Amino acid sequence: MFSILKKDNNSRARSGTLTTFSGRTVETPAYAIVGTHAEVRCLPAEKMKDARVQLIIANTYHLWQRLGKDIEKFQGLHAEMNTPDMVIMTDSGGFQVFSLGFGREHGVGKVGGIRNSSVGTERSPSPADRAALRSHPGESDVRRIPSSPGFREFPPDDFLIHNERNMRDKNLVRITEEGAYFMTDDGERFLGPKLSMEIQEKLGADIILAFDECTSPEHEYEYQKQALARTHRWAEECIAVKTRNDQMLYGIVQGGVFEDLRKESSRYIGNLPFDGFAIGGSFGEGKMREVIGWSVSGLPEEKPRHLLGIGKIENILDGVAEGIDTFDCVIPTREARHGGVWTREGRFDAKKSANKNSDAPIEKGCVCPTCAMGVTRGMLFDMFHSKDLRAGEYATMHNIFFFNTFMSEMRRAIQNGMFREFEKETRGKLKK
């Protein structure tokens, strides 16, 4: 159930409460923290509440690949992550249709440009980027899932760029009208609407997503139209095969950067009996707010809306202003692992020499557990350069707390009728 508590008079922004069929709740607007492989990297489960985490999103494709046959005895995401009271979502695997497919082939992210895994942003690579990539041709970010013996090692996210060759690489996905075939070390593996629903039901998230085709920003109109027809057929199949009544099912609006396709998809998906909706696919440079507006135009007001894979501050403002309730993105966690720290004064790189021997706090006035311990920028610099594992945890804690606090302040601004002022002030700080 979704309850809208307050609407903004000057935009589509709203604050509310999302209560899942399992009884877990989220205050919206909210930020879903990414736990791709059933854990939030560098942040132990017992510290998530201290970081003000309300919502986590895990990934169906990656868990399916790693669990294999063990998925039959999987205890469920809440038990695996030790988060019994927290709301968990699962992506359907549709993003990997793009990220392992045309995203690799076209060398683009959802918004456009090459994705640089070290900072978690999407942009074209600079000469410095290319030089850095050539200087570390074999570098990888590899780990194992704790308490899961027998799991293979794996890179943590899609689109990791280990060398310049991977800026445009082989398409590993073959799309058919029934679903998608992924090329793996064990040969082709098929994932379609029915199997995606079966996997997500076994994973046991509170909110699950319909299987869709996430398209590339470089796809032309005719391909986007064909992909949209597939997504719509798959949406109906997901509804038909879903069996669990304790999971909310979200339909996904697609259509690329084309107004008529976005509005068509919004009407079509909005008229199906989904419990909520997600906005997926490509947005194009500089068109984020416009595309979101088209995408929500046909959705029922009384149901929740999620924006998939988008989480920069300016994009959150765009989304909330157009009626988005929840977001997910790797920015808080991925950037933290690489030294990127977010503050009200802007983002800074903790690894840079300017922070060496600095006694300045990470963020003045911040009450997150990291800042409350008195960790300074100089201390964080030393920990990153000495490979101290606390560096990743402290930076991750701070970043997640920062983004969740930002969402809390935005909720308060909407409730007090001050969203326009909040948006204006925040955008002003971003320009500095």
Image (cartoon, rainbow, N blue to C red):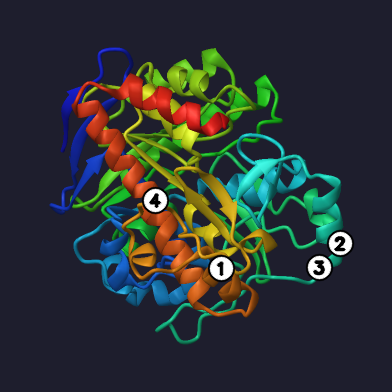
**Mark 1 or mark 2, earlier in chain:** 2
Which numbered mark, 1 or 2, is in the foreground of this view? 1
Q: Which residue is mark 3?
A: 136
Amino acid of disc 4? Phe
- Type of amino acid under label 1: Gly
Q: Nearer the viewer, mark 3 or mark 4?
A: 4
| Mark sitting earlier along the chain (3/1) | 3
User: In 3D space, how far apart are the residues under numbered discs 3 and 1 (Cα atoms)?
Assistant: 26 Å
Residue 210 found in image quarter: top left
The kind of residue tagged 3 is: His
* Nearer the camera: disc 4 or disc 2: 4
Q: CA distance from mark 4 to mark 2?
A: 33 Å
Q: What residue is shown with label 1?
A: 378
Q: Are marks 3 and 1 in contact (CB under 8 Å)?
A: no
Q: Is residue 419 above or below residue 112?
A: above
Residue 319 left/right relative to 350 = left
Tag 1: Cα neighbours inside 10 Å, few (<14), some, or many (≥20)? many
SS category of the residue bearing label 1:
helix
Which structural element holds mark 3?
Answer: loop
Which callout, 3 or 4, points at the residue further toward the start of the chain? 3
Residue occupied by mark 2: 134
Which residue was labeled with disc 4? 402
- Where residue 120 sits in the image (x, y, percent)? 60, 51
Q: Viewer-nearest of labels 1 and 4? A: 1
Query: In which quadrant will I find the C terminus?
Result: top right
